[in-house]
Image: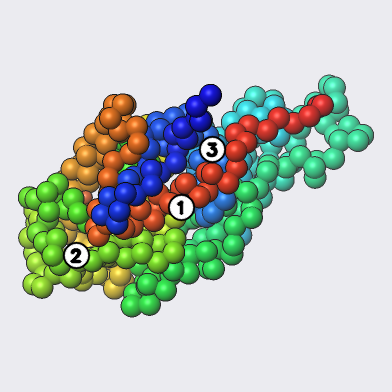
Amino acid sequence: MSKKKNLFKIKKPKNLNTIFGLPAKSYTDEDFWKKECNTVLSEGWLFVGFVHELKKIGDVSPLFIANKPILLVKNNNNEIKAFHNVCSHRCLKLVDEKKNVGKIIRCPYHSWSYDLDGNLKAAPHIGGTNQHQPKGFNFLDHGLKPIRIYIWHDWIFINYNGKAKKFKDYAKPLIKKFNDIDLTKLKYATTLDFGKINTNWKFLIENFIEPYHVQFVHKTTTNQPLKDHYTVVDGICYGSGVDVKEEDTKNSSALSVTSRYLSLFPNFIIGTYFPNQVGVYLNIPISPGVTSQKRIIYTTDGKEMGEEEVKMVKNIWWNVHKEDHEMCERLQEGRSSPASEEGGLLSPVWEKGVQTFQKLIINATMKSKKIIKRKKNV
Ligand SMILES: [Fe+2]
């Protein structure tokens, strides 16, 4: 019998200048997606939201990321907590929209209620009419299931399996690149919410970290020559940068400023733009072929952005991103062709970051062969 081909492994390079990318199934296959959700997106620190979006005590924000419903909650101490968004009673998805719940999160099904720290406070009539707390039923055992969380400036990270390194050790390669910017001074300027994009989440990350396409895809929306770009690869942090000789901060239609584009594995993306702009992207993997994306723009000097400037900045970025999304959707469509089964090719120079990212994906997913583990004798 012939040896079965491993459809998820990167093809070995023929020589230094022929580097293959991830096989097509890594972007389309349901089993690979499930594996990815339980490894790549569960083992490290996953970026899930923005602190400024949960302003008041009692604000809750449900999210479906990496195939799991989660819930972010602002508690009475003004801290943000993360829970699995599932009622302990019948595992109904507890909260289905962003809102303020006051002091109690109540399940609409049988009214089981939790405080803002996830403690179960009420399970009405569970033991029969007016039997709200029968013997042997301990409320302390049935609170919401917490998820490990870390807040870095305005950015919320979770670690599903609870086993990742401490955030500051995990993110060290990225954090040390911000010695020149005081991130505590970041001021929110505006949001660009792109909603759902018909592409695998990895294409959006890969597109962001390689500068190769900029000269072609963003020909009219940017003026940043390829020769001025450089690539960055440092462990689980990779990306690129461009040093523009003459900054143009007045042009309202084309971006032409010194910039850095960095990503932290798996899904955090941050860009810095001369003289005072930072952009952070939230990419939410929803299914193999669907990802949602949002970009928040901040100023770094503590200054408010005026209305006109916000309009200009939004306009530039909206157009740049739409150009990227079109390419990412076509990358996804290309993956249904048998010609892309073994993956495309990568530039050994400009797509070094992409290569690193893809190796991290393969390393994480190849560790575990088990896709679904059943609980025995329940
Ligand atoms: Fe782009």
Q: As displayed, is residue 329 above or below residue 300?
A: above
| Marks 3/2: CA–CA distance | 35 Å
Q: Say what amino acid the circle numbered 2 marks.
A: His
Q: Nearer the viewer, residue 259 or 49?
A: 259
The residue beneath circle 3 is 35
Q: Are marks 3 and 2 in contact (CB under 8 Å)?
A: no
Label 2 CA crowd tier, 10 Å (few <14, some 14–19, many 20+): many
Element under label 2? Answer: strand
The residue beneath circle 1 is 360
The residue beneath circle 2 is 229
x, y percentage for residue 69? 55, 36
Element under label 3? Answer: helix
Q: Quadrant of the C terminus?
A: top right
User: Residue at horizontal 71%, vertical 34%?
Assistant: 88
Q: Nearer the viewer, residue 348 or 313?
A: 348
Residue extending furthest toward the top:
129
Q: As displayed, is residue 34 above or below residue 239?
A: above
Residue extending furthest toward the bottom:
180
